[in-house]
Image (tube, rainbow, N blue to C red):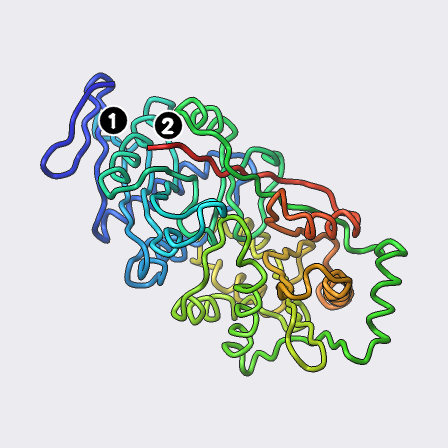
């Protein structure tokens, strides 16, 4: 392709009449989100999300990710018609992570990748790469939209069923386009599904029963009356438990408060557990009812009746699906028998309440790094199987 960059930042790809326009204002962000929603609507099994939530994620005032990130959004036009979008971004905290954990100095990212055809996809990736080079980056990871804690990775397995909450869902042909642009897989993220309306294998039951007899161990529900304090306990464990994992970026104080506010409506104390040893919090497990079930029914729209339906569902979820987005055990216990005991006890206690109090029959765990041997072993031991795979790609700049 040939072309150039105009003084206003637009990138012109002359031989295909593609214009890549940088987005920086509120009107542009709305166009960026609406274009993504248009693309998503054509993908089989996609579940529409709330537009207000999608706008908030790319709002530099509302999303604390922007406190430590540089972000540039782009929309591609052909003949004046929007035909694609992408984000280029740099997480300043990710630059401080050791290189052997996947990020580190010189690491930029792309996300929110949507394109009507491969030529547009190539032009968008080139624009993101040029911006990252101009910011001094030497390699790019993606797609990551935009924080590693939001929607990382491109769906490459599991297109035949709808995603649960907070999981991306992409057309199958994006994989070939991204790989043809010179990207190679850097990390695989897996989700596991299992039927929770049946007992776990005898080995797991024995481990749980042993833990129930151990007076040093307590598995408690979170207290919503002091939820921000509980979130701080959980994220303290998370920051310790995940600190050596690939792609880990710690939460900031403002992100902790933000996460507490965003999670609170979906939290049911029976489904979020903290394991304590001698009264000290040492592990946690978060489970959410799958809000994608009512969102699929409302089409992601709050009006005229969607808001009422969604509020009613949030107060008393009654769907079949539960998702475990996060769990962790303090590092000092991770190579001990206690780690699996904490995990199996929390999983079993939540499983019981998910069935009896919420009528759930299916659970999904993840994402899990493909080389996280401890979590992969736990997933297999309780009888779960891989149902979705996401790839994060890399490319030198």
**Residue hosting label 1:** 78
Q: Which is nearer the N-term, disc 1 or disc 2? A: 1
For the C terminus, the quadrant is: top left
The answer to whether residue 354 is seen in the rendering is no
For the N terminus, the quadrant is: top left
At 46% across and 52% down in the image, what residue appears? 150
Percent coordinates x, y for residue 332 in the rendering: 65, 66
Percent coordinates x, y for residue 127 in the rendering: 27, 33
At 69% across and 76% down in the image, what residue appears? 276
Percent coordinates x, y for residue 77 in the rendering: 25, 31
- Circle 2 — which element? loop
User: Looking at this view, is 374 or 147 the one in front?
Assistant: 374
Binning the other alpha carbons within 10 Å of mark 1 as few (below 14), some (14 to 19) or many (20 upward) gives: some
At 32% across and 46% down in the image, what residue appears? 89
Viewed as shown, does residue 333 lie left or right of 76?
A: right
Q: Check whether the beta carbons of the residues at disc 1 and disc 2 lie within 8 A of each other.
A: yes
């Amino acid at each position: 392709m040939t072309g150039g960059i105009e003084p206003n930042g637009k990138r012109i790809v002359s031989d295909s009449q593609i214009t890549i326009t940088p987005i920086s204002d509120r009107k542009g962000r709305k166009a960026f989100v609406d274009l993504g929603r248009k693309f998503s609507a054509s993908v089989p099994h996609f579940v529409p999300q709330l537009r207000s939530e999608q706008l908030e994620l790319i709002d530099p005032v509302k999303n604390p990710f922007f406190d430590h990130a540089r972000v540039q959004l782009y929309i591609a036009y052909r003949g004046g018609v929007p035909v694609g979008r992408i984000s280029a971004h740099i997480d300043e905290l990710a630059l401080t992570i050791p290189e052997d954990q996947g990020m580190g100095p010189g690491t930029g990212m792309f996300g929110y990748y949507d394109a009507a055809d491969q030529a547009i996809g190539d032009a968008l990736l080139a624009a993101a790469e040029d911006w990252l080079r101009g910011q001094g980056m030497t390699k790019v990871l993606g797609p990551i939209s935009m924080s590693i804690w939001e929607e990382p990775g491109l769906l490459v397995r599991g297109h035949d069923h709808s995603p649960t909450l907070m999981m991306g869902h992409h057309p199958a042909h994006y994989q070939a386009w991204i790989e043809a642009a010179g990207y190679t897989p850097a990390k695989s993220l897996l989700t596991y599904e299992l039927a929770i309306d049946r007992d776990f294998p005898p080995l797991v039951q024995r481990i749980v029963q042993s833990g129930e007899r151990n007076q040093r161990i307590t598995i408690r529900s979170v207290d919503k009356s002091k939820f921000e304090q509980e979130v701080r306990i959980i994220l303290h464990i998370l920051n310790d438990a995940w600190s050596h994992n690939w792609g880990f970026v710690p939460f900031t104080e403002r992100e902790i408060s933000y996460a507490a506010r965003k999670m609170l409506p979906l939290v049911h104390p029976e489904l979020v557990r903290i394991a304590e040893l001698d009264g000290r919090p040492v592990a946690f497990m978060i489970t959410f009812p799958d809000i994608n079930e009512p969102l699929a029914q409302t089409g992601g729209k709050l009006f005229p009746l969607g808001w009422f339906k969604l509020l009613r569902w949030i107060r008393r979820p009654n769907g079949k699906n539960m998702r475990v987005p996060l769990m962790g055990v303090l590092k000092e216990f991770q190579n001990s028998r206690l780690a699996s005991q904490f995990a199996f006890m929390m999983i079993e206690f939540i499983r019981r309440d998910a069935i009896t109090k919420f009528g759930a029959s299916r659970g999904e765990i993840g994402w899990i790094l493909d080389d996280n041997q401890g979590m992969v072993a736990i997933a297999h031991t309780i009888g779960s199987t891989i149902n979705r795979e996401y790839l994060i790609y890399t490319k030198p700049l």
